[in-house]
Image (cartoon, helix red, strand yellow):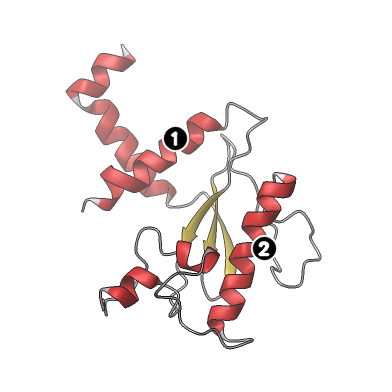
Amino acid sequence: MFTYPCVIYGMFVAALNNTRFPEAPVYLYRFSAETKLNYLKEFFDIKLPGCLHSDEIGYLFKGFATPKITKNSCEDLAMRRVVRMWTNFAKYGNPTPREDDELLGVVWNLTTKEEINILDIGKNLVLTRNFQNDEMKFWDKLFYDSPSGRKYTQ
């Protein structure tokens, strides 16, 4: 109930606004990897499915709650993927600069005004185009048809 108006829709609008600046590419992701590296879920012993805000931090940095990582485990694979994409972005401005990268196996396309591309970072890396388009249109209409929305669009 709160996720769409407070997080997802705001992210959607901010991403679209930022596409006006081509020198600053926009890459959007949804983090759905559920492993022992989701430190907040582990720390608070949350058994519900899904990831929490900032769970990806456990894949980038070792902390007091980081478990021992077994080579080639789901944690190891997810961690190597996240680190590779974040360092690629820092180095090249593109999280997937090589189409033949066997570890990633996906090209993460930019988000543009015409196409919202979301990379789902889970057990697999899956690119989705025009992420939840119907839901975003609903929130657009709700916000722009509201009294405060009309005030700014007149």
Q: Residue at x 58, y 86 (%)?
A: 73
**Residue 94 horizontal/vertical position (percent):** 70, 48
User: What separation in Å lies between label 2 and label 1 (alpha carbons)?
Assistant: 25 Å
Q: Residue furthest top?
A: 154
Mark 1 packing: few (<14 Cα in 10 Å), some, or many (20+)? few
Depicted 130 relative to depicted 43: above or below: above
Q: Residue furthest left?
A: 147
**Residue 43 horizontal/vertical position (percent):** 30, 74
Depicted 132 relative to depicted 24: above or below: below
Depicted 105 relative to depicted 36: above or below: above
Please give the residue where the numbered disc 1 appears in the rendered image. 14
| In-front residue for pair 82/31 | 82
**Residue 89 horizontal/vertical position (percent):** 67, 50
Type of amino acid under label 1: Ala
Depicted 73 relative to depicted 105: above or below: below
Q: Residue furthest front?
A: 64
Q: Residue at x 43, y 41 (%)?
A: 12
Q: Residue at x 42, y 35 (%)?
A: 13
Left or right for 99, reference 8: right
| In-front residue for pair 67/136 | 67
Type of amino acid under label 2: Arg
Quarter-of-image position of residue 11 = top left
**Residue 60 horizontal/vertical position (percent):** 54, 64
Left or right for 34, reference 123: left
**Which of the two discs, 2 and 1, sits closer to the camera?**
2
| In-front residue for pair 40/17 | 40
Mark 2 packing: few (<14 Cα in 10 Å), some, or many (20+)? some
For numbered disc 1, what is the local secondary structure?
A: helix
Please give the residue where the numbered disc 2 appears in the rendered image. 84
Answer with mark 2 or mark 1, whichever residue precedes in sequence. Answer: 1
For numbered disc 2, what is the local secondary structure?
A: helix
